[in-house]
Image (spheres, rainbow, N blue to C red):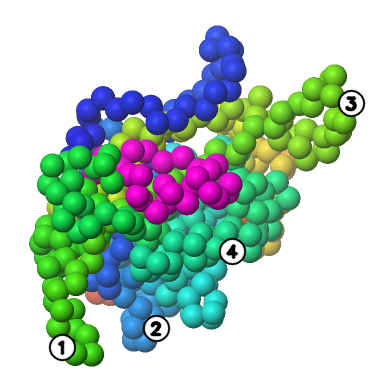
Amino acid sequence: MMEENEEQPDVQLADLSLNKDNYEGESFRLHMVTWNVATADPPDDVTSLLHLSSPKSPDLYVIGLQEVYSGPLRIVSDIVFDDPWSQLFMSTLAPRNYVKVSSMRMQGLLLLFFSKLEHVPFIRDIQATYTRTGIFGYWGNKGGVSIRLSFYGHMLCFLNCHLAAHMKYASERVDEFEYIMNTQTFDCKKAPQIVDHRLLFWFGDLNFRIEDHGMHFVRSCINKETYNLLWSKDQLTMMKKKEQMLQEFDEGPLDFQPTYKFDLNSDTYDSRLYKTWFGFNGKKRKPAWTDRILWRLRPKVSLPDEQDENKVELDAKTLKQLEEDEEYPLKIRQDFYTSNMEYSISDHKPVVGIFTLELRKMYKTPLVRLQPEGDWSADIDAMVVYSPLQPFPSSTWDWIGLYKVGFSSVLDYITYTWVKDDEVAFNEEVIQVYVSKEEIPVRGGECVLCYYSNTLQCIIGISEPFMVLESKVAIEEGVLPERINGLDRTVANDEFWK
């Protein structure tokens, strides 16, 4: 198995024909995980899966799971509360200053997108959707869930799929993928369909198998780590030669053990006896790379040849895309791609892909700058001051939330105030918003303020961390934690003070 710090050849580096002297790109690290968890409960620790001990911390985490337990009682509870898998990743990443920006759940399919706090005001145009393909398209046990967004102006899309199972359905898997690609649409003029995004990641339990080779040969290659002898019979590799849509996708070399199918709680490939009409037989599932991570960089637009008599004039959208490609280039490199053999709660092993995105930011300032005014405590009414730095579609439903440092998602606020309802002073440059002392936590703590735009459906400004002071009145009156109101309990619990 490859270690993360080993030198890896670049799998893809988009040729943008740019002079390095005038290219001012910045690099961002993306950590991706795909894992069919086979309805298992989460493990106690995901440190290894997220490479939390690595000296290089990612800017973004994208986690796609398949076969998350979706029994009737669990589905009902997950509507009200985050599911156990989301809770695990949120509680693990939040103390490290990662925020869950978006998530999408369709029955057993779950997709989570996390970002370092510093990038959150620059992640916009967030939309999520799903497509069912199981049982004539009415059942969500198979299909795809996606999250799309603008990252510093670059349109990215992440598509987590669970496609049809079994060896003989390779063509059906491709048909399902094409159906998902063609039917998922977004309310965005710039990228209304998946293929319109600048960068697309396609991953999940794609269920492609290894054809022709017998069980003994496959297992022998795995034991000898001669994985390359199996590549030519990998169904996805074979289908890419025939399907034009698949040819636009890149994937790193499969230099790791096939991730399916394992006996539970072991590293042993399938050894079970399967029950048939006439008793048991010894037919076992052949190992395969069912769990994959691929990506597609949008093809560059080519200018028509001036000497071509049949040249077609480029439309406005295409011209804008060409201009964007040249002015704001985007490069991608895969640095790491392997299975993680440590986890054995499922018959699949998780797969990790780590990428470097190099891009030129289309904007470098948030839409709003905000900060607390004066000292904050539950003893006196407080004030938030904010300034719009760029025009944006404000709404009466915009609000400013008070969050503890290390919050896990946009809904993890201590309290909030409606911007328009509680506005007390206004001019063209600075706006003041009132916050009642009744809403401020008695215990205090280190906090941040976030401006949430209802129209844009995202956080568009975050303050610097500041201290909310402990209430002197509460101390003098001997207010105990159990007497504190519900909002105060959020920050009075033990977790906040660890």
| Amino acid type shown at disc 3 | Glu
| Amino acid type shown at disc 4 | Tyr
Q: Which badge, 3 or 2, comes first in the chain's sequence?
A: 2
Q: Is residue 477 visible?
A: no
Above or below for 163 versus 7: below
Name the residue beneath numbered marker 4.
179
Name the residue beneath numbered marker 2.
76
Above or below for 226 versus 379: above
Q: Whole-Å distance between the Cαs marked 2 and 4?
A: 29 Å
Q: Whole-Å distance between the Cαs marked 3 and 1?
A: 71 Å
Q: Which residues are magenta?
A: 231-256
Residue 91 percent location from the top left of the image:
28, 58
Q: Nearer the viewer, mark 4 or mark 1?
A: 1
Above or below for 464 versus 8: below
> Is disc 3 in contact with disc 2, using a CB cutoff of under 8 Å?
no
Label 4, residues with CA under 10 Å away: few <14, some 14-19, many ≥20: some
Q: Whole-Å distance between the Cαs marked 3 and 2?
A: 63 Å
Q: Whole-Å distance between the Cαs marked 1 and 2?
A: 38 Å
Return the residue nearer the eye: 56 or 272. 272
Label 1, residues with CA under 10 Å away: few <14, some 14-19, many ≥20: few
Above or below for 338 versus 414: above
Q: Which badge, 2 or 4, comes first in the chain's sequence?
A: 2
Residue 312 percent location from the top left of the image:
85, 34
| Amino acid type shown at disc 1 | Gly
What label sits on residue 309 in the rendered view?
3
> Is disc 1 in contact with disc 2, using a CB cutoff of under 8 Å?
no
- Side (left or right) of 217 relative to 398: left
